[in-house]
Amino acid sequence: MKPEAPSNSPVGQSGEAEFLGDPISPISGGRVPRHVAIIMDGNGRWATQRGLPRVAGHRAGTENIRRVIERFADHGVKYLTLYAFSTENWQRPQPEVRALIRLLHFFIRRELANLHKNNVRLQMLGHLETLPDWLQRRVQSAIELTSGNTGLVLNICFSYGGRDDIVMAVRRVIEEEIPASELTEEVLARNLSTGTMPDPDLVIRTAGDLRISNFLLWQAAYAELYFTDAFWPDFGREDIDIALAEYGRRKRKFGGLLPEDIEAFKTP
């Protein structure tokens, strides 16, 4: 079984949110999420608007990742999960698929030294066995190099799907011969690909679409959702600051009631 994970349930018996301690941004002084997950959308449309091939948009989006990592790290975010390639993306035209795979190699080759220098720990979520052998070795080497780093944890989701993640977790439970009577939400959560980290507090999607597209379906059950019209290659420091400021203004209830809400229901 995977190592014991922090509790993924932020709800106490009273139904009130029991915050595990959101970091305080040294930039804004406001509350920021521990874990941000991003659906990096709009690369193709960004390229089309500029009369460029779609792969140029994907490359621009890959080059934007460094700026995004640095800004979230500056704010004190502890985990950053990026949706790079879904299980459904294999159905795209093969030239585009091959280009996206090459861009994963481009990212690791271009950014690994900088990630390691800045104490970032790299993790990959998804079916990495679907990658070419040479790239699997390159990815594994990058993961091992940064495994001892203690700063921001960067999760790259490649060949990942939320439904598939749940199915794979169930398979692990079965393989571990856990009795059905002992199967709980906590047990299943520990067997997800994110089982050793807290659930995302904030899910961001760029490029204007209002859906989560099979991304972290279990883990995002109580995440705050934030949508922006900015295409991913244009999603920069100011956009991040605005998204985090919006998060800081929200009251997170996790399906329960806050004390001031309970008071409103009391009979005079």
Image (cartoon, rainbow, N blue to C red):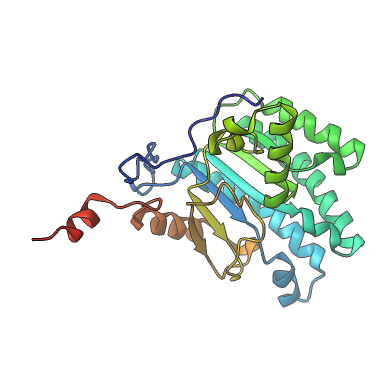
Question: In this picture, is 193 found above or below 2?
Answer: below
Q: Is residue 130 left or right of residue 150?
A: right
The answer to whether residue 195 of the structure is visible from this angle is no
**Residue 163, position in %: x, y?**
69, 51
Residue appearing at x 27%, y 51% in the figure: 258
Question: In this picture, is 225 found above or below 15?
Answer: below
In this rendered view, identify the residue nearer to me: 149 or 19: 19
**Residue 174, position in %: x, y?**
72, 32
Q: Quadrant of residue 79?
A: top right
The answer to whether residue 101 of the structure is visible from this angle is yes
Query: What number of labels is visible?
Result: 0
Residue appearing at x 71%, y 26% in the figure: 176
Farthest residue to the front: give it: 181
Locate the N terminus and report the quarter of the image it occupies.
top right
**Residue 38, position in %: x, y?**
59, 54
Locate the C terminus and report the quarter of the image it occupies.
bottom left
In this rendered view, identify the residue nearer to me: 118 or 102: 102
Q: Quadrant of residue 210?
A: bottom right
**Residue 137, position in %: x, y?**
85, 32
Residue appearing at x 63%, y 62% in the figure: 232
Residue appearing at x 82%, y 54% in the figure: 100
Question: In this picture, is 262 found above or below 142?
Answer: below
Q: Quadrant of residue 47?
A: bottom right
